[in-house]
Image (spheres, grey):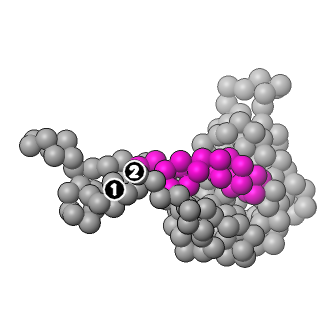
C-alpha cells in the first residue's frame, strides 16, 4: 500500500482467476505431455531442446541415488530417433514430478501455442470478481494489476488470441 493507504497494485494469479485451475491440470498439461514427441520431431526443435535438456538432466541428477535418478538422454552421436525418445522420456519424468524447469515450461508454452493455432486446444476464460476489480482499478488509474506468473500470462494471452469461449 502507498503512504496514504491506497492500493497500488492488485496481484493476480492467472490460474484459477481467468482460467479454471482444472483446465490447466486436466487439459493443458496432458496436452503438452501427449504432444511433446510430435512437437519436437515435426518442428525440428530437437537440435534446440536436446542440449538444454541435457543440462537440466545433469542438474536434476545431482544428489539423486540410482533409484531416483532421471532417465538418461542419448548422446548427440546417437540417432535422431534415439535422442528424441530419450528427451521425451526425460520430459515425462520431469512432468511426473511437476518440476518447475524453465526449458520444460518454455516447451509446454510452445506446444500450447501450436495447439491453439491449430484449433486442437480451445481455451475457456472466466471473468470473475478479481478480474473485474483489477480492470476497474486499471481503467480508473487507481492501481496497477500485476500478474503472478509470466508463463500463465503467456498461456492466457494465447487463449485470448485464439479460440476462446467466455462464460
Q: Tell me residue 81's x, y (percent).
A: 90, 61
Query: Foreground residue, 139 or 151?
Result: 139
Q: Tell me residue 136's x, y (percent).
A: 29, 60
Query: Foreground residue, 25 or 128?
Result: 128
Q: Kindly identify which residue carries mark 1.
A: 134
Q: Which mark is residue 143?
A: none
Q: Which mark is residue 130?
A: 2
> Is residue 74 at least partly visible in the picture?
no
Is 21 covered by the magenta stretch?
Answer: yes
> Is residue 16 at least partly visible in the picture?
yes
Residue in the picture at 47% in, 58% down: 127
| For the residues bearing labels 1 and 2, Cβ distance under 8 angstroms | yes
Q: Which residues are magenta?
A: 12-33
- Crowding near pointer 1: few (<14 within 10 Å), some, many (20+)? many
Q: Is residue 41 above or below residue 27?
A: below
Residue in the picture at 46% in, 48% down: 13
Q: How many marks?
A: 2
Amino acid at each position: 500500500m502507498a503512504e496514504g493507504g491506497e492500493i497500488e497494485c492488485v496481484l493476480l494469479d492467472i490460474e484459477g482467476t481467468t482460467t479454471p485451475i482444472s483446465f490447466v491440470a486436466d487439459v493443458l498439461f496432458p496436452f503438452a505431455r501427449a504432444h511433446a514427441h510430435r512437437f519436437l520431431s515435426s518442428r525440428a526443435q530437437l537440435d534446440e531442446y536436446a542440449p538444454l535438456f541435457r543440462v537440466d538432466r545433469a542438474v536434476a541428477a545431482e544428489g539423486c541415488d540410482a533409484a531416483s535418478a532421471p532417465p538418461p538422454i542419448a548422446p548427440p552421436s546417437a540417432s535422431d530417433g534415439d535422442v528424441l525418445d530419450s528427451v521425451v522420456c526425460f520430459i515425462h519424468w520431469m512432468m511426473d514430478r511437476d518440476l518447475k524447469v524453465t526449458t520444460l515450461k518454455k516447451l509446454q508454452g510452445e506446444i500450447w501455442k501450436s495447439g491453439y493455432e491449430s484449433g486442437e486446444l480451445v481455451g475457456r476464460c472466466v471473468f470473475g470478481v478479481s478480474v473485474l476489480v483489477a480492470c476497474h482499478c486499471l481503467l480508473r488509474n487507481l492501481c496497477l494489476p500485476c500478474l503472478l506468473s509470466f508463463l500463465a500470462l503467456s498461456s492466457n494471452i494465447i487463449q485470448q488470441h485464439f479460440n476462446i469461449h467466455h462464460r
